[in-house]
Amino acid sequence: MSERCDLVILGGGLVGMTLALAAARAGITSHVVDKAAPEELTAEGADGRASAISTASWNLFANIGLAERLEPLGCPIEAIAVTDGMKPGRLDFRPTAEEGSLKKDSLGRMFANRDLRLALFEAARAEPAIVWHTRAEVAGRERGAHGVSVTLRDGCVLTGSLLVAAEGRQSPTRDEAGFSLARWDYRHRAMVTALYHEKPHGNIAWEIFYPAGPFALLPLLDTPEGRHRSALVWTVAEKDAKGVIGLSDHAFLHEVAGRMCGLYGAIELAAPRMAYPLSFHHAGRIVGERLALIGDAAHGMHPIAGQGLNLGLRDVGALIEVLTEGRRIGLEPGDAQLLARYERWRSLDAFVAMSVTDGFTRLFGVPGRLPSAVRRLGLGAVQRLPALKRFFMDEARGMSGKLPELLRG
């Protein structure tokens, strides 16, 4: 039997560990259980993905003491360019000098997932309020009127007031609780890697929509040797995925270069190539008796807008705010009133964000000249309407809706 903590967090990834660190700042203790070892997750080449961290999510990281660690590692996104197949009618999101409340890098920052993990894990090791269990397999979960307990394969029993499922899309805790899911398969795969390129990216994130799927180029910091880099997320239809995965590196780069239309000049691979199936899911409920879902355990979306991780970090901010306010009036973390408030706060916000993303995915996936012309007409209209552009920029920055205090700056 291990010491009792306020939270038992199953899943020590980006969202789960951020929750533990944010909880520690609020005086809330946590058991964090992860089946992987941190050195495996942070090994060179283990994960070539990168994440766009919105302004709101950056505020969260800063408010839990990670700014100093992360500041030198993130590449600011100064503008977002959206185009339908690189045809005329491009839409540019770039804060102007008149928008005094928007900082130069206010559209977000790009981080390698490995760098985010290294910063989170380093902070967790130094935090006495976190009891971290790695290479740990869960053998059983129990929830009852007086608390929760998790039994590990090695026989260790962890107890707490609230069980938090942060295990990702295939969450066994969510499934064991019997939560229903709205889900569908996009029948696409994301080809993910990083590129070296001849020309600088100018801190611009490109979202290029092709009928077969979006093609995103996301700016990364130059290497210490001065080589320019960008993250690539190329969405291909499932029927074509096997062929693309089987391409040689040379042939893969040839296909990528054709879709970049010479944007950054000559290109080379800068990271291993990875492929991930794309799907949508949204849990009908995100709380149960002494149970809360966060991140991909609660909702999974298309990476078209790069908001999946940011949505999970909003879950973190809302849950911490609810639990902190409950502590002030003497309620324990597993109290049903607090969980109901968390569910009301997050369910609608997450559903709206995911529905918009899904709608964009389907809209830009319609082939043909007429749909393309209509899309470009719409992009041009938004380009000419400052108020509408500002609305979309606030969405990209994560600064819309009711924000938890940790995400406000």
Image (cartoon, rainbow, N blue to C red):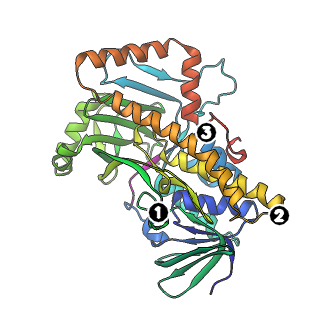
Mark 2–mark 1 Cα distance, whole angstroms, equals: 30 Å
Q: Give the SS element for disc 3.
A: helix
Badge 2 or badge 3: first in the primary sequence: 3
Region rendered in magenta: 47-51
Q: Residue type at mark 2? A: Gly
- Disc 3 to disc 1, C-alpha distance: 35 Å
Other-residue count near label 2 (Cα within 10 Å), few / some / many at <14 / 14–19 / ≥20:
few
Residue hosting label 1 = 178
Q: Which residue is mark 2?
A: 330
Q: Estimate the x, y position of residue 27 in percent, counting from the top left.
A: 76, 64
Residue at image x 72%, y 52%? 321
Which of label 3 and label 1 is nearer to you? 1
Question: Which numbered disc flags the more N-terminal residue, 3 or 1?
Answer: 3
> What amino acid is labelled 1 in the image?
Gly
Front of the two marks 2 and 3? 2
Tell me where residue 378 appears, x and y as whole percent. 41, 16
Q: For mark 3, what is the residue? A: 55
Q: From where the camera sits, is residue 394 visible? A: yes
For label 3, the crowd category at 10 Å Cα-Cα, with few meaning under 14, some 14 to 19 and many 20 or more, is many
Q: Secondary structure at mark 2?
A: loop
Residue flagged by tag 3: what amino acid is it? Thr
Q: Secondary structure at mark 1?
A: loop
